[in-house]
Image (spheres, rainbow, N blue to C red):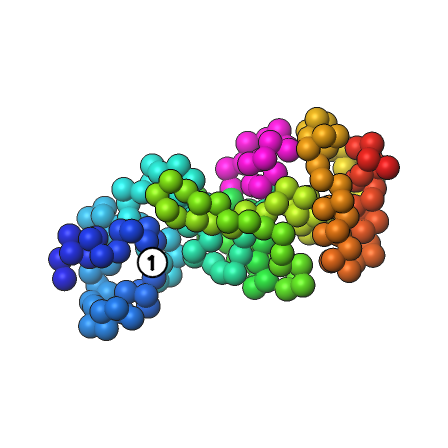
Amino acid sequence: MTYLQFREQWHKVGCFNVYQVRSVAPHFDRGNLTRWVKKGYLVRLRQDWYAFADLLGEAEFSRYVAQKIYAPSYISLHTALAYFGIIPEAVSQITCVTSNRTAHYENAFGEYTYHTIKSSMFFGYKPVVLPQGYSYFLALPEKALLDLLYLYPQYDTEAALLGLRLDDWWMQDGLEVNRLREFSGKAANVALQKRTELLLKTYRHD
């Protein structure tokens, strides 16, 4: 199989793993992938995972990569909060949550960190569809906040919560308080519920 033939068949999926290719072409020589990486046609994402190099400049494709190379997962925490304009800092690392083990990967598309949450907390996200047709899962803003409070229990004082510098306008007018409380109750974690209520009190939603 030539590279052009391979590209014609696989470019539409953006990134892929060796096992997907061999499910379609059982006799595919995986050595081709190594050669095409050396030629700059492909980018190695992690073990057995690759993407087409010409997608490096595509907006938001790095978030799609996050979804593909480690599943199940969705983008949350600081990356999601920055996406919605809730925190002031620009976030270079892509932060995700997963019901699998904690993991970390770096490749040409970015740096990816996956934090473990309980399977019972794996909810509260939506698909984001990119113009190219690719899609990834992104936490709803209320769930991104809840994931942050869950994974960082040190945010248990007003001073610590104010240190997050959450956007005042959004916390007053954009936050769906009932949704946040619904998510907090669904998590069935008393300490997390207390931190959630403290967050609301701190930002004048008492």
Q: Which residue is mark 1?
A: 16
Q: Is residue 31 visible?
A: yes
- Identify the magenta region: 79-93
Q: Quadrant of the C terminus?
A: top right
Relative to 134, residue 172 above or below: above
Badge 1 density bin: few <14, some 14–19, many ≥20, Cα 10 Å: some
Name the element at disc 1: strand
Indicate whether 75 appears above or below 47.
above
Label 1 is placed on what type of residue?
A: Phe
Q: Residue at x 15, y 56 (%)?
A: 5
Whether 91 is among the magenta residues is: yes
User: Which residue is at the front of the view, 59 or 53?
Assistant: 59
Is residue 89 shown in magenta? Answer: yes
Q: Main secondary structure of the magenta part?
A: loop
Instruction: Say which residue appears at 81% left-offset and 51% top-offset.
Output: 193
Left or right of 4: which side holds 172?
Answer: right
- In front: 78, or 160? 78
* 47 sits left or right of 38 in the view: right
- Looking at this view, name the residue that lies furthest to the top: 169
Measured as percent of width and height from the top left, residue 163 is found at 74, 33
Residue at 64%, 64% in the rendered image = 119
Residue 113 visible to an observer of this rendering: no
> What quarter of the picture does the N terminus occupy?
bottom left
